[in-house]
Amino acid sequence: MTLNNTEEVLVQREGRAGLIVLNRPAALNALTHAMVLRITEALDLWERDNRVDTAVITGAGDRAFCTGGDIVAIHHAATGWAARWPPTSSRPATG
């Protein structure tokens, strides 16, 4: 399955099934913290939705369903690394 959508997790309902597609094929659909939060949100919603009987999770691309957690992305999210990059000494002067 190849998708052009740029969202990392695609969520939809088809009939009585809730569908989740992990959409990071270049990273072998490795999970980020944001992806886990989006999946949890969808599953929580469907748990209370009488129209949904089952949930199906699949992965985009042809190489992997999911290789697990993206350790680098999870570390960056947990430590706020992205907000601190580039280091202050490397940032251009403003003003």
Image (tube, rainbow, N blue to C red):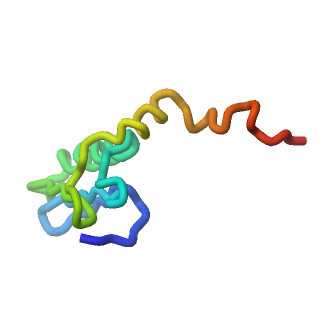
| Viewer-side residue, 82 vs 28 | 28
In this rendering, position of residue 64 left or right of residue 74? left
User: What number of labels is visible?
Assistant: 0
For the point 35% across and 41% down, the residue is 70
* Residue 15 image point, x, y percent: 14, 68
In this rendering, position of residue 24 left or right of residue 21? right
Please identify the quarter of the rendering in which residue 22 is found.
bottom left
Compared with residue 72, is residue 20 higher up or lower down, i.e. above or below? below
For the point 40% across and 43% down, the residue is 34
Compared with residue 3, is residue 9 higher up or lower down, i.e. above or below? above
Single out the residue that lies furthest toward the top: 79
Single out the residue that lies furthest toward the right: 95
* Residue 63 image point, x, y percent: 23, 61
For the point 19% across and 46% down, the residue is 48
Please identify the quarter of the rendering in which residue 80 is found.
top right
* Residue 91 image point, x, y percent: 75, 39
Single out the residue that lies furthest toward the left: 53
Quadrant showing the C terminus? top right
Quadrant showing the N terminus? bottom left
In this rendering, position of residue 83 left or right of residue 1? right
| Viewer-side residue, 14 vs 20 | 20
For the point 55% across and 33% down, the residue is 81
| Viewer-side residue, 18 vs 80 | 80
